[in-house]
Amino acid sequence: MGSCVSIADVHVVTSSLVVLLAMGQARADDLKWGADAQGGAPYVFEDPTDPNRLVGFEVELAGLLAQRVGQRATLVHGPWANLLELLARGDFDVALNGIEVTAEKRSVVALSHPYFAAAEVLTVRKGDVTAPRSKAQLAGHPVGTLPGSLAERIARDAGAVVRTYDGGQNDLYDDLKVGRIDAVLADEPIAAFYGDLEPSLERVPGDFGVVSYALALRPDDATRLQALDAALDALVADGTLRALYEKWGLWNPQVAALLHDPRLEARGAPLELDRWKAAVGKLPPFLERVRTRYPAMLPLFLEGAALTLATSLLAMALAVLLGVSLALSRRHGPAPLRWLAVAYTEFFRGTPLLIQLTMIYFGLPELGVKLDPFVAGVLALGLNYAAAEAENYRAGLESVPSGQHEAATVLGLSTAQTLRHVIAPQALRIALPPMTNDFIALLKDSSLVSIVTLTELTKTYVNLASSTRDHLGLGVLVAGLYLLLGLPFARLARLAERWFGRHLEKGANA
Amino acid sequence: MTLKLDRLVRHHAGNPEPTLRGLSFDLPAGTLTALLGRSGAGKSTMLRCVMGLESFESGTLDVDGVQVRGSTECRAAERTHAVALARARLGFVFQSYELFPHLDVLENCVLAQVLTRGLGRARAEDKARGLLVQLGLESRLHAWPSQLSGGQRQRVAIARALALEPRVLLYDEPTSALDPSMKHEVLQTLKRVDATGVTQVVVTHDLQLARGCEHVCVLDHGVVIESGEPEQVLKHPVHESTRTLLASWLEAG
């Protein structure tokens, strides 16, 4: 029934699939490390002046460590909240992305020597006399932090009304600025790269706690842990790490104490911090961004769009095939098959796609089935949408009057011939409009695959918006791309609908 | 003998009385027969049983030498096979025609030839075109069914059935869905088909149509109560039920 997809489309899809799979292949001498580019500066982020390049002090640290152990650093993207699960699943070998040293973490992963430490910093609106200015004053105030962070626990313990932000560090300070929260409690690098950029905000002096970061490895990966610890120690000993932090404006008393370095003052200018401030401090007007910035981001967006399209087309193909089988089983199959088809439809229609994808990607490895991220994404979307497709086809099949079946029967057509030549062409006309609707919905729902390390169109947008602090302009751009992806299919479907309904048009071909 | 029914019994679940109570008749080859009877007499059930759209419990159906026995009297697989063989010798014109709306007139008459008779497209089209021309549809070959008048649709349905060269062609109420002025045209069509030697059975409420046939059977309570030439059955009915039936039809006009 997927006759609206031409052979040429299938070629495009399969060739992009091959490229995608090839991209996912890592060599044995790669040090695969996991991080989330959505977290932003100064950890791992797209360079605002050259978005095709990932930068950040952790990108450089990963490179230095890999060099020390004789490997090549390869980044695997994953949502920050899922990094430890992805590590356990084996999607990468090291999580290196502001992983905080805590007792609970030690029970699930092996942590390296800490490589960084920083104070927790409270930021408030300038001149806000009612704002909390000490740990004790946090009680009762709405305070923004990152979910699952030390800052969150400190704020909670102090009795604050905690709001956590998944979307990126930018959102924290934007909400503080507009008054949705009274303060932000965050690690010092975040305050330095985001909060300090806002002239209407200020840091509150005082002690709110100290956080330290370490590499996370699988508990059974002792040899690698030993090698990376030795590499870290060497980077500390020869001053490489200190120089790195100074360049990023991250050299502070806490990190000096951590690395047992008596020189508290940073040497030289924080080049990277200054470069960041110059790049994102003040957004140029929209039209200028369109002219000067967006062209450089286009390749990233197109890459994301290609992944979105490939995922959606393959998932839809699966959904159509499975949906047809389900609808036919339900109508023509023996009783057990009919029940199975009904149960399938109810299960996949009645449970969230997010849960299905999480179970397939993170749950199945427990049963020994470890799927490639792309395969898992296509499978979850396809299985889910098959339930909707099955209902579309059932509606289509039921719309054909029983007299048509009987006419085909008395002419001697077999059940298969009747379906193929008499019922399907009439049913498809009814099923096509909701099918088109589903494909457009699938195109948008495919953004969920970002939780399994795939940087599709939406994730590309969120990452770039976070690293360039440009949510509105890039939002318009990405919305346009989604429309461009969907509209040709909507148009194609209209043409197909007209073809299948041509016998109903007035005066046609008379 | 091309169509013979021998003591067909069909009992619909939930009904106190069987719909067909040992229905028997035997139609000579090449005749045009009208089957009359009040509503509920078992005419439609008889047609559906003959066409294999419904099964009958006992009795024997014989179509041009192919015998189909009742569902309680033989194995299901054997019966399915016999029904298919019988069907290949039968044609059926539905009351509502049931043309395939997504296929044009010519294709409606080609599809089954290609799929069930294994005919090449060119030969199937030639045959379909020939029949459609004979039935006066030469200018409508590529029209959609939705663009045809009722009478034209019926003739397409007849051509579609004739394209498969049936030995027996059955009609369910061919005049009921048509304008009264078309009745004459229907009879002309039936006579034209009769001339080709096909045995025809017409289930009808229409006395005028019945008068034009060569043979008339009257059904009541699932059995044939009267049969013979139209002149005799319609003018001098023997059976009380037939008289009541004819009187009610004459009243209704």
Image: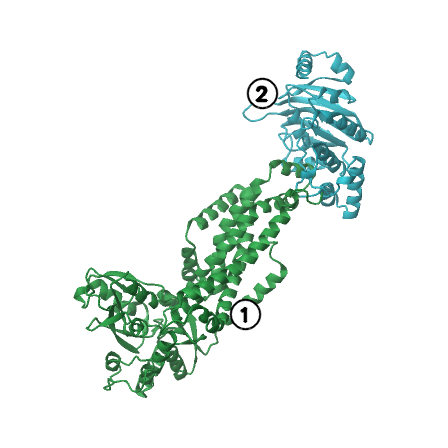
Chain colours: A green, B cyan
Residue mark closest to the camera, 2 vs 1: 1
- Per the model, the C-alpha gap separating discs 2 and 1 is 72 Å
- Element type at mark 2: loop
Q: Residues within 10 Å of mark 2 (few under 14, many from 20)?
A: few
Which residue is at the front of the view, B237 or A282?
Answer: A282
Circle on res. A311: none
Q: Check the image and report above or below for B74 versus A451.
A: above
- Give the residue number, with chain letter if any, for mark 1: A19
Amino acid under label 2? Glu
Residue A370 can be seen in this image: no
Q: Position of residue B125 (x, y in %)?
A: 77, 44
Q: Foreground: B69 or A461?
A: A461
Q: Quadrant of residue A44?
A: bottom left
Relative to A310, A183 lies left or right = left
Q: Amino acid at mark 1?
A: Val
Instruction: Please give left or right for residue B138 compared with residue B36 in the image.
Output: right
Label 2: which residue?
Answer: B17
Residue at 62 percent across and 29 percent down: it is B72
Residue at position x 52%, y 65% from top? A306
The chain carrying label 1 is: A
Mark 1 and mark 2 in contact (Cβ < 8 Å)?
A: no
- Coordinates of residue A491 in the picture (x, y in percent): 58, 55
Pinpoint residue A392: horizontal percent, then vertical percent.
Answer: 53, 46
Question: Crowding near pointer 1: few (<14 within 10 Å), some, many (20+)?
Answer: few
Name the quadrant of the C terminus of chain A. top right
Rendering quarter of residue A92: bottom left
Quarter assignment of residue B1:
top right
Q: Is residue A440 above or below residue B20?
A: below
Give the residue at the far left of this rendering: A136
Q: Is residue A111 left or right of residue B197?
A: left
Relative image position of residue A289 (x, y in whole percent): 44, 71
Q: Chain for mark 2?
A: B
